[in-house]
Amino acid sequence: MLAAFPQCLADPYADLDPRLQRYWLSAVSEAQSVVSVLRSDPAMFAGFYVTPLIALGVCGWAVVRERGDRAWIVAAAFLAIAMLVSFWQVRGAMFSVPLAAIALAAWVGGLRRSVEMRGGALPQLAMVASWLASLNIVWQLAALPLKPTPEAGSGDEIAKLERCYSLSDYTTLATLPAGLVLAVSNQGSTILGATGHRVLNGPYHRNNAGNLAALDMLMGNPHTAADTAQRLGVTYVALCRGNPETTSLRRWAPEGLLATLFAGNTPSWLVPVAGTADAPIEIWQVRDHR
């Protein structure tokens, strides 16, 4: 297999364009490593890593206590592999956290049996403590003081805006004649699902060409972007002010098309769609120069 498909040994993102690595993947929260999470958001670390670490400790203790019981060894092996994946990318926690629940439930259950057999305040306190330590929400609440403060200049008004993850935000866009929509990648899949439109980009790292074309237009010169839009057949441009990706692209390209539209300036090749100026998603139609 490795002789026939040596690319399986490469980084899964080896084919991702360097610009997408820098201006897209680096800002995808679920693609961050444990080191990045610790550096940027310790509260996220508490929510995704603490209970699996406790569960792995419980598994190790149980393996020693039960003298190599196979059930605990299997649980520890699956959990350890899932945790290694989550250390590489936080999305691996989608596996490690549920797997941790198996070991933690057994831990709490064992202490519950101890209460029934021995009684007394100490076993009860131990059971309650194990139960609380097994809940992600407890660690998330404990880590709230570590939550990073909003970036300077982001503004409270932006934080209160819609992030455009609701299907209802796309109602107006869905009523427009079908076409090709230019928007941030976070909106791509929802536009496909909620409307009859096509999109250039989405949260898919194998879509090098489409993601790169959209990134170049959104971050590029507002006037020269018209030529690319005409060449690719872009029909509409959609802006969601509250989406985190919008904030990132504005910061990286303050003179780019997205930042220009955000500031209320419309290039001559775009026409605002009536009634969307104050909507969660603002829409412009590309002028037909044929």
Image (cartoon, rainbow, N blue to C red):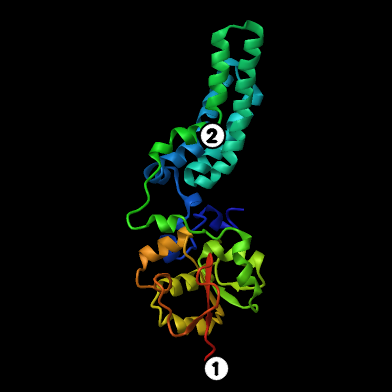
Can residue 26 be seen at all in this image of the molecule? no
- Circle 2: residue type: Asn
Q: Is residue 166 visible?
A: yes
Lateral position of residue 194 relative to residue 43, left or right: right
Residue type, mark 1 in image: Arg
In the foreground, 251 or 279:
279
Percent position of residue 234, x then y: 55, 79
Q: Secondary structure at mark 2?
A: helix
Q: Position of residue 112 (x, y in %)?
A: 64, 16
User: What residue sits right under mark 1 in the picture?
Assistant: 290
Outermost bottom residue: 290
Question: Compared to 98, does 172 lie above or below?
Answer: below
Quarter of the image where one finds residue 68:
top right
- Mark 1 residue element: loop
Residue in the foreground of this view, choosing between 16 and 276: 276
Q: Position of residue 109 (x, y in %)?
A: 64, 20
Q: Give the position of the C terminus as an image quadrant.
A: bottom right
- Position of 208 relative to 289 (above/below): above
Tell me which residue sits at (44%, 55%) in the image: 159
Give left or right: position of 146 versus 204. Answer: left
The label number, if any, that marks residue 117 in the structure image: none
Tag 2 residue: 136
The mark nearer the N terminus, 1 or 2, is: 2
